[in-house]
Amino acid sequence: MRKILVFLLVFCASTGLRAQDVNPSAWTLYNGRYDLNERWFLNSELHFRFTDGALTFQQFLFRPQVSYVLNPNFTFSGGYTYIHTYPYGEYPLPNDIGENNIWEEVMIHHPLGSLKMSHRIRMEHRWIEHPVVSGTGSINGSNPGYSFGNRFRYRLILEYRWKDSPWAVMAYDELFFSTNEYLVPQGLNQNWLYLSAKYKLNDRWVIQTGWQQQYLELANGTTQQNPTWLTAVHYHLPARP
């Protein structure tokens, strides 16, 4: 009993000492798919992310990709992402940070009647700018270099669409892991949970909106819990017959 009490005291003390940050956020994104033929398509994403009650710019993302549909159950993709992160929250970065990454991805689909289950597996290869602060503590506008690392992401997606209805509900849980030099996932550093409603306007446009809860562990030891309202606009341009 004494050992259990000692463990609980140490655990509570260490948890209390860890800096925590809560940032209510609002994210918007555009997702466009452009079919080349029945097998190949291009995709582009634009993300505009705000925090502090949608008053502070948090991140901007641009993500183009090319994809190959092997069959209705498997799609393979490769792409590039540019991420620009701004200082925000109680423990902000000293200056804006840029990231460039390239990635490979496989999507696995399991249609189950009106319910569709999907798995998205992505490996990212990331070049991240170093935050720079001068000796006096002021921000130094120049940036001397980049750090390289790999990140593994797994997203489980569930979507239910009512028959003969434009409405659907979608939920996902995505885990982010840093990897070792052999690309084996190890430390969990992010977890995203999302629940949303989708409305199909027509054969080309879909609007989606819902609630996302983010958990992040940052390199400086800070943890973030970011409740986020996420709205997405999806566009699909079919291939010409």
Image (tube, rainbow, N blue to C red):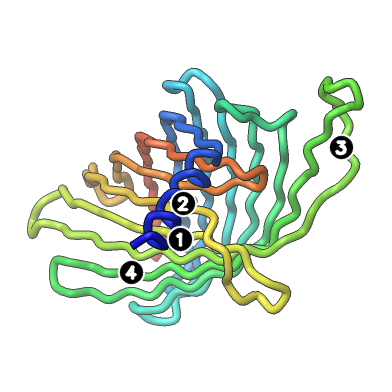
| First reached walking from the N terminus: tag 4 or tag 2 | 2
- Crowd around label 1: few <14 · some 14–19 · many ≥20 (10 Å): some
* Residue 55 vertical placement versus 41 (above, below): above
| First reached walking from the N terminus: tag 3 or tag 2 | 2
Q: Nearer the viewer, mark 3 or mark 2?
A: 2
- Crowd around label 2: few <14 · some 14–19 · many ≥20 (10 Å): few
- Front in this rendered view, residue 36 or 207: 207
How far from the left and from the top, in percent, is residue 192? 41, 51
Q: Secondary structure at mark 2?
A: helix
How far from the left and from the top, in percent, is residue 170? 25, 54
- Front in this rendered view, residue 18 or 111: 18
Q: Nearer the viewer, mark 4 or mark 2?
A: 2
| First reached walking from the N terminus: tag 4 or tag 1 | 4
Q: Nearer the viewer, mark 2 or mark 1?
A: 2
Q: Nearer the viewer, mark 4 or mark 1?
A: 1
Q: Quadrant of the N terminus?
A: bottom left
- Crowd around label 3: few <14 · some 14–19 · many ≥20 (10 Å): some
Q: Residue at x 83, y 22 (%)?
A: 137
| First reached walking from the N terminus: tag 2 or tag 1 | 2
Hey, what amino acid is under mark 1?
Answer: Leu
Hey, what amino acid is under mark 4?
Answer: Ser
Q: Which residue is mark 2?
A: 11
Q: Cα distance, mark 2 to mark 1?
A: 24 Å
Q: Secondary structure at mark 4?
A: strand
Q: Secondary structure at mark 3?
A: loop
How far from the left and from the top, in percent, is residue 234? 37, 46
Asked whether, in this view, residue 173 is left or right of residue 175, the answer is left
Q: Which residue is mark 4?
A: 118
* Residue 238 vertical placement versus 16 (above, below): below
